[in-house]
Image (spheres, helix red, strand yellow):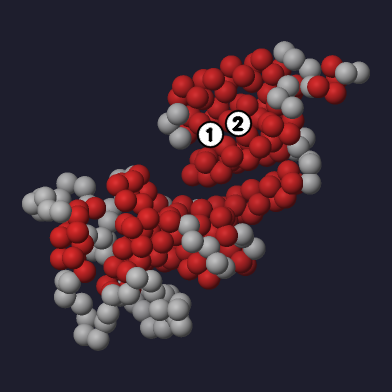
Amino acid sequence: MAAQNALDRPALADLAEARWRSGDLLGAGRAAQAHLDSGGDETMALVVMAETLGAQGRTADARAMALRVIERAGPEIDQLFCGQPRGQAWPVETVPGSAAAPVARGEQLAAWESAPRPAGSSLATSPPATRSPLSGDRRPVSAGGPTPTAPALERALSELAALEAALDAGAIEPLAARLAILVRTEPRLATRILMLAERSVALAGGHGGTAAALHLVRGDALRILGRESEAAAAYRQSGRSLSQPPPNEENA
């Protein structure tokens, strides 16, 4: 929990998604709630909260959160789940393989919103502002508790935050080796590692050993993300960077 408290908003959203995909819904919900409490509004955090609230039996709150996601993501919602199972908070039309007859989107959402709910509940467009969705009495969401990989993931996110701070301060040299380790030990963070590697390459000038190593990191991250052609291009760029000296050496 201490490590989670040290994470920034994007890292909390990343942590929520990673825990959710690894089966730790309770830990995912806590990370998503921390992200929202800090003023964050990442779509993936809203997805995790909808799943968490639904698992707690808080159907109205879960549907309200799911509706926010649907309105924001539209037809791209399948890409958010990437095969993950969906709880009952989501309308039938968003569940792949549903046997329901096709209906207009407006009719589908209207039927979903009018479905029976616990007595006294109401569907709002967002959770009540006066209390946290995870506060109060609730039944356990995950009998197994946090997964064994959660502490390692939190350390990796803290490491990424430290590397981003170092990059902001202009310290590029140590980044390549540390990112190369992270992309192999925590491939779930490939998107964020890729962004950081690309920023680092730009600051490194694109040439020399540091840039070559960073292009290798880019290639590894792109391959993890299934972007094979871009990964191959990054590997080729690594070789070209190594054969050219950095700009400061050219001017020497």
Quadrant holding the N terminus: bottom right
The residue that appears at 27% across and 56% down in the rendered structure is 86
Q: Is residue 59 left or right of residue 212?
A: left
Would you place residue 243 above or below residue 73 in this image? above
> Which residue is the site of mark 2?
217
Residue under the point 53% across and 63% down: 40
Asked if labels 1 and 2 touch by Cβ distance under 8 angstroms, the answer is yes
Residue 33 falls left or right of residue 67: right
Q: Is residue 135 left or right of residue 77?
A: right
- Considering only vertical position in the picture, is 128 above or below 24? below
The three-letter amino acid code for the residue at tag 1 is Ala
Q: Quick one: quadrant of the C terminus?
A: top right
Q: Tag 1's secondary structure?
A: helix
Q: Position of residue 117 (x, y in %)?
A: 20, 77
* Frontmost residue, 106 versus 131: 106
- Return the mark for residue 221: 1
